[in-house]
Image (cartoon, helix red, strand yellow):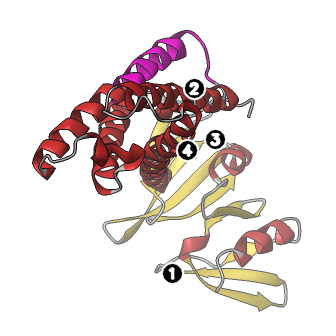
Amino acid sequence: MDEKIPAYLYEKKNNVKTILFTALFALLFINLFQPFGSRDWYPGISDIRYFAFSSLIILTGMLVVVISRMILMAYSKRRDVLYWQYALWILCEVVSMSIFYTLFAKFFPKGGVGRDVSEIFRQSLFNTALVLLLPYAISWLYFSWKEKSVLLANMEQEKALDVHARTLVAFPDEKGDLKISITLENLLYIESADNYATIYYLNKSRQSHFLLRNSLKWMEENLTKDTPLVRCHRSYIVNMDKVKILKKVKGGIVLELDAENTPDIPVSKTYYESFMYKFSRYTV
């Protein structure tokens, strides 16, 4: 209860929608259920005239909600509104509108003066709670669903963009200057020799390579996280998406890639466990 309420509960456009929906709900409620004995206020009149009178009464009573929401929006600009404060705010709206309808039912219709005020207020409080809380709850559920739908759509979009960004692997040199970028679907493996690395990839279905001055250690630390790239040997990083066969031989494990004229890539004892952990994520 000491947490801040969601922004959609005090945004201007949502408050306007809530007020309009509540007014429509209240109008239907008073005409269908005729609370407060309102149909007896105007004996002998047609349903159309009763609808006109009841509409005027509802719209007048809704001024309480309009004023309340204007104050709430102004207050929320200066301070955070907590859940318990918002609940108290709504309670004040219900009580204020109940007092309005109690005074109206007591003094406006014929025969109202003779009715007990406490009984009128009790009935008004019950009906007003229904008139306000039901459309409020429906509005809150709708706004919450809409906000979560937008958040989910944004997350999906960000995820798609993130995946798209990761599919293109950038290779800088040891100074940080970008030298080449290759899509993961075309990247085969990387082989190191001293401070140089040779990147093997497919270019128009033909195998190509690019010599880069950078260490395999840097590539392991910066390019293998959340990608199918994995270091399997002190001299090799391999693209798991391109591994066609994992084969156990006398000297250990070798990998055959799904591309012509590529050598078997060894898996050394040093990198065996980390390689097999990542390999398990790519097996069915």
Crowd band around label 3 with a 10 angstrom C-alpha radius: few (<14), some (14–19), many (20+): many
Q: Amino acid at mark 2?
A: Cys
Say what secondary structure mark 4 lies in: strand
Would you say the residues marked 4 and 3 are in contact, meaning their CB atoms lie under 8 Å apart? yes
In the rendered image, residue 270, in percent from the top left (x then y), is placed at: 88, 65
Residue at mark 2 to residue at mark 4: CA–CA distance = 71 Å
Q: Which residue is mark 1?
A: 258
In the rendered image, residue 112, in percent from the top left (x then y), is placed at: 39, 33
In the rendered image, the vertical position of residue 85 relative to residue 54, given as above or below: above
In the rendered image, residue 8, in percent from the top left (x then y), is placed at: 47, 34
**Residue 76 falls inside the magenta stretch:** yes
Q: Amino acid at mark 3?
A: Asn
Residue at mark 1 to residue at mark 4: CA–CA distance = 24 Å
Would you say the residues marked 1 and 4 are in contact, meaning their CB atoms lie under 8 Å apart? no
Residue at mark 2 to residue at mark 1: CA–CA distance = 71 Å
Q: Which residue is mark 4?
A: 212
User: What predominant SS class does the magenta segment belong to?
Assistant: helix
- Residue closest to the eye, 114 or 156: 114
Number of numbered tags placed on the structure image:
4
In the picture as drawn, the residue positioned furthest to the top comes out as: 78
- Residue closest to the eye, 64 or 149: 64
Residue at mark 2 to residue at mark 3: CA–CA distance = 69 Å
Crowd band around label 1 with a 10 angstrom C-alpha radius: few (<14), some (14–19), many (20+): few
Q: Is residue 198 left or right of residue 112?
A: right
Crowd band around label 2 with a 10 angstrom C-alpha radius: few (<14), some (14–19), many (20+): some
Would you say the residues marked 2 and 3 are in contact, meaning their CB atoms lie under 8 Å apart? no
Q: Amino acid at mark 1?
A: Asp
- The mark nearer the N terminus, 2 or 3, is 2
**Quadrant of the image containing the N terminus:** top right
In the rendered image, the vertical position of residue 197 relative to residue 121, given as above or below: below
Identify the mark at residue 92; answer none if there is no mark. 2
- The mark nearer the N terminus, 2 or 4, is 2
